[in-house]
Amino acid sequence: MAGDIQLSRDGAIATVVIDHEARRNAMSQHMWRRLGAVFGEISDDGDLRCVILRGAGETAFCAGADISEFDKVRGSAAASREYENAVRPGLAAVAACPHPVIARIHGPCIGGGLELAACADMRIAGASATFAVPSARLGLVLSFHDLYRVAQLIGPSNLKEVLFEVATMDTAHALRIGLVNRVVPDAEVADNVAATAARIAGLAPLTHRWHKQAIDTLFAHGHPSQVPDEAHESAHEVFDSADFREGCRAFMEKRKPVFKGR
């Protein structure tokens, strides 16, 4: 079947590759299902500290869903429901991954590709990257879950502009509205992302995991007073960890801490 999701590991850093270069890394239904399975595997790996999500080659991050298969897999309301049953768990698995996820963006980041990048925790783009959601050209709609993730990043007004005008954004526009965290020269994006992942991997993983979950929980409930008591209490558990003791000892001894994730 055309296209796949590849996974590799280098120490504490995993790299997930959207591999469908013939179609600018467009996502087939099979690939959406594979994405969920791969991120499920990653999420269960306690030795990982950071994940890089990228497109194969240097042409595109992801050109969106593979429209060539739409007649078969999305040609009716019933088929669309089944298609979403593949897409939604894949996107949700990326967003729910306990490890920090960095989207390394080069070239087009379009439609479903933009939704996928929005599920990452950080987005670092090469200067020539482009962004768009061309749903109004195709006559299709985004689900509430897809709209929510992008709206969290750029706000409802900016999202409406993106959807209504179907204009292709450059990185300057994407940076201005908060769609990406950082823009670097194309030739430097790989090294910049690798260095960022290495910095994250060298810090306390339990702290990163708690902060990621806490931020998602906070925005889901809207205000700290609405967050369940057990979530508040979980913040204290890190003070029982060996990593907390190691961090304090290393600070007092003026050395780099060695965190174990426990």
Image (cartoon, helix red, strand yellow):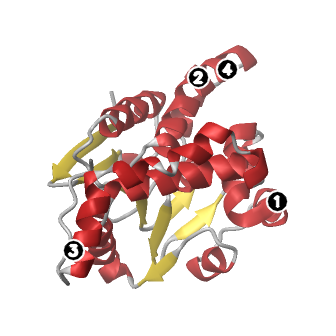
Q: Residue at x 77, y 45 (%)?
A: 226
Q: What percent of the width, then of the height, locates residue 197?
A: 31, 66
Q: Please tell me the numbered disc located at residue 85.
A: 2
The residue mark sitting in front, 4 or 1, is: 1
Q: Secondary structure at mark 4?
A: helix
Amino acid type of disc 3? Answer: Ala
Residue at 32% across, 37% down: 4
Helix, strand or loop under label 3: helix
Q: Do labels 2 and 4 touch, CB within 8 Å?
A: yes
Q: Residues within 10 Å of mark 4 (few under 14, many from 20)?
A: few
For disc 4, the marked residue is 81
Residue 100 is at least partly visible in this image: no
Query: Which residue is under mark 1?
Result: 156
Amino acid identity at mark 1: Pro
Dot 1: what SS? helix
Q: Is residue 58 left or right of residue 8?
A: right
Of residues 187 and 253, the one nearer the viewer is: 253
For the residue labelled by badge 2, is the local secondary structure a helix, a strand or a loop?
Answer: helix
Q: Give the label on residue 219, or none.
A: none
* Horizontal and vertical percent position of residue 207: 40, 58
Above or below, 92 against 175 in this view is above
Residue 187 figure quarter = bottom left
- The image shows residue 72, relative to residue 149, as above or below, that is above
Q: Is residue 212 above or below residue 139?
A: below
Earlier in the chain: of badge 3 and badge 2, it is 2
State the residue lying farthest toward the top.
78
Q: Give the amino acid type for the residue marked by disc 2 in the picture.
A: Asn
Q: Is residue 181 left or right of residue 147?
A: left
Q: Which residue is mark 3?
A: 250
Report crowding for label 3: few under 14, some 14 to 19, many 20 or more residues within 10 A (C-alpha).
some
Q: Using the rendered view, name the quadrant where residue 44 is placed.
A: top left
